[in-house]
Amino acid sequence: MNRVSAIADKLQSIVGVENLHAATPGDSFCGRQPESVVSPGNEQELAAVLACADQAGIAVIPRGGSTKLAWGNAPRKAELVVSTLRLNHVREHAWADLTVTVEAGCTLQSLQEVLARHNQRLALDGLWPERATIGGVLSTNDSGALRLRFGSLRDLILGVTLALPDGTLASSGGKVVKNVAGYDLPKLATGALGTLGVITRAVFRLHPRSVESLTLSFAAATVEQLQEKILAVLDAQLAQTALQIRAESSAPLEVDILFEATAAGLLAQQDRLQKLLGEIRAERSGDRNWMARQQLWEASDPGSVIAKLCLLPTDFAKTLRALEQIATSETLRWRIVLQATGLGWLRLDGRSPGLRAALERLRREIEERGGSLILLGRPPELDSLGVWGSEGDAVPLMRAVKQRMDPKGTLNPGRFVGGI
């Protein structure tokens, strides 16, 4: 008898017989096969399930749309999956106040459709919005190019409710039910990979939908020219909403700039951008360019590596030059999407010995300039390379917070930095 079976009667009394079932091979991830999957219908049930598992010493894996379960370390144990998909309601859209309260299992796309009825949006362009849930997006701190204008998730979130392993429902920020003194829960939970508590609902600030939009793209002949033009655009009095670089092996360097305004405003922005670029011509391009980040995962094979980069915008040229040289020496193919905020996503394809050497060299160069390279996807033979790279000096503090909120290590054990 597996460990979850010992508490099956308790779990069924909480969620109902139909909402607890044995895990299938489709529920496995990162080489881990859970025993069971439980689907609470509200946050009180979810908190009670966590308390039951915590008391029994059972490792819990929170799961939303399953789009990013491979991010982070593989958990040391994965016995009970707690699905949030039944917590999928928009609880309150205070459109006059530009705020929304939404449950964690609601998909990003479903939320945007509700907000659009009042011509509003959550200014967030996360990956796979039709499947990614609000809780998963927050737990992985996933945001795209729109953060240049609207800020990161930590800027958009106003409040959050967490179910803690001991069964407590703790809220902080907007729409407060219970405050937890000393902790800024919205910011603490964002990016924690579900290791501190299970997000049950969140409150966000909203923005109006754009009147009209225009994407302009231009190509740069060299990385130095690209660096010069991007810094000029960022320093100019332009009102761009997003800016990204697209580059790949043996292909031109391309830059996309998104503007949102009235028709007259867009024409004015286009004219000013063209004067700024000088001899380089910016052409209107399609919105599909903004799917470039997500396309890095398309048609990937088990030998592909996908990494997230964090750089200073002034280091774009140095990083691209280093990437090109390293990939060439190791006979690798590469594609990269860099955003004006300094975040980037890289895909490398090739043979494993070359991949390992290239990643080690590239990570070392990036870290020497104060950046980071985090592995989001890699073949099993590169598991020893490490997801996070240099962990810095914050790990002891992170361990202390984990110990305070999840003393038994029930939630996603080992998944975060430092094996937390």
Image: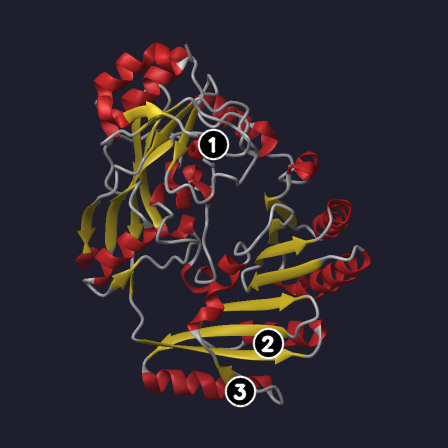
User: Is residue 194 in view?
Assistant: no
Residue annotated with mark 3: 274
Q: Quadrant of residue 228?
A: bottom right
The percent coordinates of residue 215 (x first, y second) are 45, 76
Q: Residue at x 62, y 63 (%)?
A: 313
Tag nearer the camera, 1 or 2: 1
Residue annotated with mark 1: 28
Q: Amino acid at mark 3?
A: Gln
Q: Residue at x 45, y 31 (%)?
A: 25
The percent coordinates of residue 368 (x first, y second) are 74, 49
Q: Is residue 111 left or right of residue 297?
A: left
Measured Cα–Cα span from mark 2 to mark 3: 12 Å
| Kind of element beneath mark 3 | helix
Measured Cα–Cα span from mark 1 to mark 2: 48 Å
Residue annotated with mark 2: 232
Query: Which quadrant is the N terminus positioned in?
Result: top left
The percent coordinates of residue 14 (x first, y second) are 23, 20
Return the mark for residue 227. Answer: none
Q: Amino acid at mark 2?
A: Ala
The percent coordinates of residue 110 (x first, y second) are 27, 53
Tag nearer the camera, 1 or 3: 1
Q: Is residue 393 above or below residue 326?
A: above
User: Is residue 352 in view?
Assistant: yes
| Kind of element beneath mark 1 | loop
Q: In terms of sequence position, does the residue under pointer 1 or pointer 2 come before the other?
A: 1
